[in-house]
Amino acid sequence: MNQSPTPLLQARQIQARISQIARDIDRHYDGDEIVLLPVLKGALVFAADLLRELRTPCRLEFALSKSYGSAMVPGAEPILSGPPPETVADRHVLVVDDILDTGGTWSRLRNRLLEIEALSVRGCFLLDKPARRVEDVKPDFFGFEVPDVFVVGYGLDHDERWRNLPYIGRLDP
Ligand code: IMP
Ligand code: MG
């Protein structure tokens, strides 16, 4: 686990795709204000770049989730904490996460946001790994589809390592 990740997506490719996603999001909300809700920690880098590309008026709140320890497979249910209810009630919420994998985090977070009366809930993911989907969910917006490999960098970690890589790479076991 000490060798460097094999590059899959270069920093420049990621930036270019983020601009396109931002235009799709702007078109979708058509000037309505949204609450951008990055899921920490993994979405930090993606959300920071996406936020600066958006022309849609944005508020910013955070959710926190943790589903992996040092293993490269999901453990038990992810630990999830959402934003204060009053910050999302009656607002359009756009959840931002690094990767949509089994869909567990996204489906639980979406249900919780609807329970606390968000007006609408959409999900934007930098990466989509459909091969491992368990929940019947799809991304509303996404950057790149990735195969069933473990990826790190650009916010994504393995056991808290590699988040600071400027590109996304594959980590071989
Ligand atoms: P899900 O709940 O299974 O969809 O998983 C979502 C979370 O698992 C993501 O936000 C990531 O933090 C983590 N995750 C899933 N696949 C990977 C991966 O390939 N590399 C790093 N983290 C991952
Ligand atoms: Mg995450």
Image: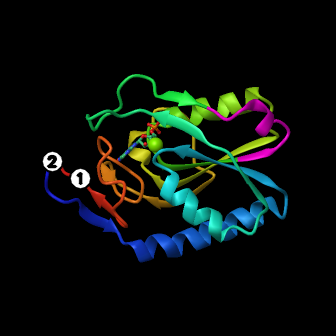
Query: In the image, residue 65 lies at what x, y percent?
Result: 50, 35
Ligand 1 neighbours mark 2 (CB distance < 8 Å): no
- Where on the picture, by quarter, is residue 6? bottom left
Could you say which is closer to the camera, residue 172 or residue 52? 52
Helix, strand or loop for disc 2: loop
Answer whether labels 1 and 2 touch (C-beta < 8 Å).
Answer: yes
Would you place residue 37 above or below residue 7 in this image?
Answer: above
- Tell me the quadrant of the picture where the C terminus can be found: top left
Q: What's drawn in magenta, residue-wise?
A: 82-93
Query: In the image, residue 138 lies at what x, y percent?
Result: 57, 45
**Residue type at tag 2:** Met
- Indicate left or right for 90 with 161 as reference: right
Residue 88 visible in the displayed image: no
- Identify the residue at the far left of this view: 2
Q: Which residue is mark 1?
A: 171
- Indicate left or right for 86 with 48 as reference: right
- Indicate left or right for 90 with 98 as reference: right
84 magenta-colored: yes
Ligand 1 neighbours mark 1 (CB distance < 8 Å): yes
Q: Report crowding for label 1: few under 14, some 14 to 19, many 20 or more residues within 10 A (C-alpha).
A: many
Ligand 1 falls in quadrant: top left
- Identify the residue at the far top of this view: 76
Query: In the image, residue 114 lies at what x, y percent?
Result: 74, 31
Which residue is depicted at the point 82% across and 40% down? 119
Could you say which is closer to the camera, residue 79 or residue 151? 79
Count of number-bearing discs: 2
Would you place residue 106 above or below residue 53 in this image?
Answer: above
Which residue is depicted at the point 31% across and 33% down? 69
**Residue type at tag 1:** Leu
Which residue is depicted at the point 74% across and 66% down? 26
The first of marks 1 and 2 along the sequence is: 2
The disc label shown at residue 1, or none: 2
